[in-house]
Image: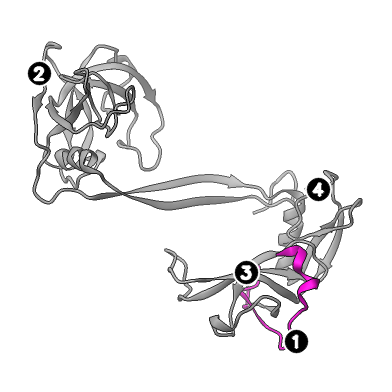
Amino acid sequence: MASASSPDVLRAPLVVEFPFTRSLGPVQSAFLTGLRERTVLGVRTVDGRTLVPPVEYDPVTADELRDLVEVAPTGTVTTWAWNHEPRRGQPLGTPFAWVLVRLDGADTALLHALDAPGPDAVRTGMRVRVRWAGERVGAITDIACFEPCEGKEAGPQPSPHTGKFENPATGIVASARLDYTHSPGRAQSAYLHALAERKTVGERCPACHKVYVPPRGACPTCGLATTERVEVGPRGTVTTYCIVNIKAKNLDIEVPYVYAHIALDGADLALHARIAGIPCDEVRMGLRVEPVWTEGARHPDHYRPTGEPDADYDTYKELV
């Protein structure tokens, strides 16, 4: 939607989200599988310290660590901060404290959430215990949070543990997400407005005279502001391309398909778009293409071959 203060400049909510998948080594596998079984494991260093969460290499000496030990699910808050407004995906939906907890038997602290009625109920040195999640899958979220508990600081000493469990966790998927409001600025707002009218508009540098599409508002080479708008295309030339064989989540395009850099006629910067209307193995550098629009769309759905002879390499080699 447009900004109230400047109707020509666009603003819209934007979400960047992707899952990050990683495999687990023997130490992390034992730690996360242990949480699934309501067991907290640490790892002992050569000098006798117990690290929780465990790591595979000593952060001081870089020695490989494999000596697993079990520590208590109770501990002491070493420091904390109150979270007034929990965000999406955080451990609790109501205000809570982020705490570093040194579990009994550990020499390092574990970061997690503490369920407390308010900041006045939290203090450094308070005793807490793990509240286990009702359903556990082998992830840090198997600890639902910490909760206050009574008792003295003294707890059991860490005891050796084999780290062996049935059906050990072998990998985790962590979802990364960023929500923010994006404003493309004056130059790209004009570009998007033009696309809505099925036109492609760039801006020319007053010094080197290059036409940038999409426009950036300034020439990246000369550093000068660009204000002269130039309509380019609609046809263009494929400068380089790739064949996509892995289907993206939430993207309704069947694989394989071709994604290409296209130098529109009159532009000095290639933009990227999907190529369709031709078998993937027939797409090539120099292929002449044109945009295909769908009803009500604000940008081309894809580009297709025009039937013209391929462009000579010398005409687009600077844009590869």
Amino acid on which the number 4 mark rests in the picture: Thr
Left or right: 308 in relation to 294:
right
Q: Quadrant of the C terminus?
A: bottom right
Secondary structure beneath dot 1 equals: loop
Q: Pointer 2 and pointer 4: residues touching (CB < 8 Å)?
A: no
Where is residue 96? Give x, y as percent.
Answer: 32, 27
Q: Pointer 3 and pointer 4: residues touching (CB < 8 Å)?
A: no
The residue at which mark 4 appears reads as 221
Left or right: 144 in relation to 318:
left
Amino acid on which the number 1 mark rests in the picture: Pro
Q: Quadrant of the N terminus?
A: bottom right
The residue at which mark 3 appears reads as 273
Pair 3/4: label in front = 4
Q: Which residues are magenta?
A: 294-320
Amino acid on which the number 2 mark rests in the picture: Gln
- Viewer-side residue, 203 vs 288: 288
Work out how far the residue at label 3 is from the one at label 4, CA to CA, in angstroms.
24 Å
Mark 2 or 3 closer to N-term? 2
Instruction: Report crowding for label 2: few under 14, some 14 to 19, many 20 or more residues within 10 A (C-alpha).
Output: few
Q: Residue at x 26, y 24 (%)?
A: 116
Instruction: Report crowding for label 4: few under 14, some 14 to 19, many 20 or more residues within 10 A (C-alpha).
Output: few
Mark 1 or 2 closer to N-term? 2
Q: Residue at x 27, y 32 (%)?
A: 55
The residue at which mark 1 appears reads as 309
Left or right: 19 in relation to 197:
left
The residue at which mark 2 appears reads as 157
Mark 4 or 1 closer to N-term? 4
Amino acid on which the number 3 mark rests in the picture: Ala
